Every structure is written in C-alpha cells, then in structure tokens.
C-alpha cells in the first residue's frame, strides 16, 4: 500500500466515526485508553508467601470496577484490568510492569504489593508519568516528594510502629525481641522499631531474621524463646509469619506478640487458630467483618452484588483492594471525559474528602500523597476472635 493510499484510508476511517485524524492519533498515544474502555495494570502476588492476600486484593478491585461498569462506567468507559502474577518477587514486578508499558496495554497502575516490589517500579512510574494508586506498603522510604504520580492509601509503617511501641511501654513490658522478615520490607520496619524502642530506652533482647519463605520459622522460634523476651515485635508478613508464630507459641505461650498492619494478612488469620491468643496488631482499615462500620457494609454489599467469592466478602485484603478501586474511580471522574495521564494524576491529587461514613480518604496539596492516617490497635483471643 502506498503512503497516499494509507493516508486516504486513515482519513476515511476517521470521518466514519466523526473524529479528525489527529484525535484518533492522540487517543492511540494514550496507552490502554479507547473511547469505550480504560485498562489498569496490576502486578501483584497471586502465588508465593502473599499469594492469597494478592488474590483477595484483586477480588476487591474487580468488584468495585464491576459495580461502576454496570452503571455505565466512567464517562461511558468500561474500566478493565490487566493482572500479572509476580509472586512477591521485585524483579518480576519490574518485568511485568515494563512489559505492560512497552506494549502500551495499560493507562495507569493499581495496587502493587510489597515494599521492594513498589520500589522497583518507581523510576519507571515517574519517568513515564503513570498514575499509580494504592501500593500495598507503608514504607517511609517510598514516600518522597519527587514521587508525584504515586497515591498511597496507607499511613507509614513508622507511624504504625510508634503506636505499637507505645502500647508495649504502657503495658510495662521490657526486654523486647524483634523478629523481622529478611527482605527490604522487614529490614526497614526493623529500623523503625529499633528507633522507637531506643527513643524510649526500652531494653531489647535481640533482633532475629526470618526467611521470606518461613523455612527457618521453627528454628528461629526456639532461638527467640531461649532469650526469654518480655514481648516480641513482628516486622513480618505472609506465610512466613504464620510459620514463626505457630512455632513460637508452642515454645512460649504467654509471651505477648505484636505486629504491624501487614503482619497477619486476612488469609493467614484462620491458620493461626489458638496462636492468636494475646496477639496485638495495628490496623489501618476498619474491621472487614464488622457490620457496625459504614464502609464495611458498603464494601460487603458490593462484593455480594457483584458475585465475589463468599470467602472474600469479609476479607481485609479485599477491603483494601476495593478502597483502592474507589480512589481510582474518583480520580477518573475528577479527570473528566477527555482523560489523559496528567489529568488523572491531577484528578487523584484533587481528592480532598472521599468519605465512606466512618473512613475518609484525602490527599494533601503536594507529594508525597498519602490518603489516610487512620491507625487502630486490635487485640485478639483464640482462633482470631477480636477483643477490641
């Protein structure tokens, strides 16, 4: 086909839809965007130590988007998702997102899971100007002013840690051991915990590295128990945390355990069974099982109406995914019909008071953008029963 024939056919195609050629070219230049749909990319763990948590996150997002799509989408566009499994491995996260960007298949990103995973894609996000909502990490190191395209929902692990250590001190506990996951997430939270303990001059009984796969959980539990700590702080998550806690409870039933919001993901709570006795956990979202919560009732109603797996209807991970979906929807509404990546970024930044009754989301006037500072403390009895 000659160049003249190509241009003639392109002009005829544009005329048939009532749009000029330049409009079609501009629309094609915005990756993952057409007049009828908008595709979001999500690289997340669907396998590995956080595979179940990632699966539940995706279920919450899909329910949020299915509900808005059933009502006509956002400005007539259906919101779609392209989901890739990274197994909680940062190099795979980078590979997945790079492929999405290179193939121009996604318009924005949502819910990357993990500290190192999110860190691996930040340079790409900022260099390409890709709006990214709800990284599942509270790492302070990622909350930098230059990261203008990332919108965090969670408060920082540093803030969570301060709240947790204060509780330990108020209980009069001494000789505190810290068990941390042997990866960038665990090491960063370890530093936060160590600093918080040093600030109030609390004696420590050691710092112990837990393998990401949890294979040293039993041996580590024996080692920690031998130190006879007054309490154990957990900078851990996923199946590895379960392996350690179960083994430690068999050695030291009466020693208090305390962790941050991601220490026990919702899918692991039933596995801990009697090991949850005396466990204190920071919470950054309302209890996903509570019918007293306005946001939880709305979340559960959406999950049921959209046919989500019944097992996920009261999942904390699904609730977080659903909230990330609500933020993205609100940002797209604010961006307007002629959405671009920059307009979506501005639309997200302009969210000041997205209210769900008992849970509110709002971003400040400048980066780093953090949507919530809510921090709760939950105390558990046997079999995951929440006492407060």
Image: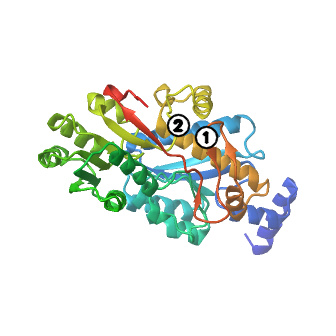
In the rendered structure, which disc, 2 or 1, sits on the residue that comes first in sequence? 2
Real-space Cα separation, disc 2 to disc 1, in angstroms: 8 Å
- Few, some or many C-alpha atoms within 10 Å of disc 1 (few <14, some 14-19, many ≥20)? some
Q: Position of residue 285 (x, y in %)?
A: 52, 41
Instruction: Give the residue at mark 1.
Output: 359
Q: Nearer the viewer, residue 139 or 9?
A: 139
User: As drawn, is 138 to the left or to the right of 17?
Assistant: left
The percent coordinates of residue 2 (x first, y second) are 75, 73
| Residue 261 image-quadrant placement | top left
Q: Which residue is mark 2?
A: 286
Residue at 44% in and 51% down: 160
Q: Please, what secondary structure does the residue beneath circle 2 have?
A: loop
Q: Looking at the image, how many numbered discs can be counted on the residues?
A: 2
Task: Give the vertical position of 317 relative to 363 (above or below).
Answer: above
Q: Quadrant of the rendered structure where residue 348 is? A: bottom right
Q: Quadrant of residue 345?
A: bottom right
Residue at (66%, 35%) from the top-left corner? 67
Which residue is at 54% across, 59% downward? 100
Question: Does the CB distance between marks 2 and 1 fall below 8 Å?
Answer: yes
Q: Residues within 10 Å of mark 2 (few under 14, many from 20)?
A: many
Query: In the rendered view, how is the structure colored?
Result: rainbow
Between 260 and 202, the one nearer to me in the picture: 202
Q: Secondary structure at mark 1?
A: loop
User: Left of 148 or right of it: where is 331?
Assistant: right
Q: Name the spot of residue 136 as percent of width and height, x first.
A: 48, 51
Q: State the quadrant of the C terminus.
A: top left
């Amino acid at each position: 086909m000659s160049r003249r024939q190509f241009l003639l056919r392109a002009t005829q195609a544009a005329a048939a839809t009532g749009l000029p050629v330049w409009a079609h070219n501009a629309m094609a230049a915005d990756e993952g965007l057409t007049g009828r749909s908008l595709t979001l990319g999500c690289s997340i763990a669907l396998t590995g130590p956080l595979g179940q948590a990632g699966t539940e996150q995706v279920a919450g997002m899909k329910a949020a988007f299915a509900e808005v799509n059933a009502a006509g989408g956002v400005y007539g566009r259906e919101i779609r998702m392209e989901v890739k499994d990274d197994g909680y491995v940062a190099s795979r996260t980078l590979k997945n997102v790079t492929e999405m960007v290179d193939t121009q298949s996604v318009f924005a990103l949502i819910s990357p899971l993990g500290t190192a995973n999110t860190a691996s894609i930040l340079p790409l996000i900022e260099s390409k100007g890709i709006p990214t909502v709800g990284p599942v990490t509270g790492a302070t190191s990622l909350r930098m002013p230059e990261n203008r395209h990332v919108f965090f929902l969670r408060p920082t692990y540093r803030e969570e840690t301060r709240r947790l250590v204060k509780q330990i001190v108020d209980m009069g506990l001494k000789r505190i051991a810290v068990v941390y996951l042997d990866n960038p997430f665990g090491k960063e939270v370890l530093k936060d915990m160590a600093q918080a303990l040093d600030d109030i001059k609390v004696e420590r009984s050691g710092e112990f590295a837990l393998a990401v796969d949890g294979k040293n959980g039993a041996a580590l539990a024996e080692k920690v128990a031998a130190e006879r700590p007054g309490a154990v702080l957990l900078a851990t998550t996923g199946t590895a945390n379960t392996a350690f806690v179960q083994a430690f409870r068999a050695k030291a039933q009466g020693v208090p355990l305390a962790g941050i919001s991601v220490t026990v993901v919702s899918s692991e709570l039933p596995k801990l069974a009697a090991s949850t006795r005396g466990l204190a956990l920071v919470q950054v979202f309302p209890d996903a099982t509570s019918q007293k919560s306005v946001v939880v009732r709305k979340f559960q109603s959406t999950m049921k109406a959209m046919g989500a797996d019944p097992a996920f209807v009261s999942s904390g991970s699904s609730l977080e995914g659903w909230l990330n979906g609500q933020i993205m929807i609100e940002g797209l509404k604010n961006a307007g019909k002629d959405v671009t990546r920059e307009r979506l970024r501005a639309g997200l930044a302009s969210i000041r008071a997205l209210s769900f009754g008992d849970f509110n989301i709002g971003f400040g006037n400048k980066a780093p953008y953090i949507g919530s500072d809510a921090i709760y403390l939950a105390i558990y009895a046997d079999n995951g029963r929440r006492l407060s």
